[in-house]
Image (cartoon, rainbow, N blue to C red):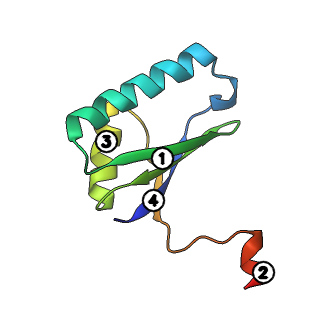
Amino acid sequence: MPKYIIERDIPGAGALTAEQLQGISQTSCAVLKEMGPKIQWVESYVTDDKVYCVYIAPDQATIKAHAEQGGFPANRISEIKTMIDPTTADA
């Protein structure tokens, strides 16, 4: 199943408290539970004004549905085509 990076514009994201991040995570997980196993949240990275999330889903429409149901922005959704890391240099 495809893997995606979702870019979410959230001004002040880097200043969110642990409690606020926990609440956002709980909302996301509740929506995921309702949607079933076709979509999976892998991890997220919080920067000053954005959150970058990695999801596994069958298509972008499923990601958009999750964002709408959870009340989250999904400003850009990009399918991951491949991954590289320092060991790629050794190939």
Query: Horizontal and vertical percent for residue 61?
Result: 27, 56
Q: Nearer the viewer, residue 4 or 15?
A: 4
Assign a secondary structure to mark 3.
helix
Assign a secondary structure to mark 4.
strand
Question: Residue under circle 2?
Answer: 89
Query: Horizontal and vertical percent for residue 69?
Result: 28, 34
Looking at the rendered structure, the kind of residue marked 3 is His
Q: CA distance from mark 4 to mark 3?
A: 13 Å
Q: Quadrant of the N terminus?
A: bottom left
Question: Residue under circle 1?
Answer: 42
Looking at the rendered structure, the kind of residue marked 4 is Tyr
Question: Residue under circle 4?
Answer: 4
Q: Earlier in the sequence, mark 4 or mark 3?
A: 4
Q: Earlier in the sequence, mark 1 or mark 2?
A: 1
Q: Quadrant of the C terminus?
A: bottom right
The reply to whether dot 3 and dot 1 touch (C-beta < 8 Å) is: no
Looking at the rendered structure, the kind of residue marked 2 is Ala
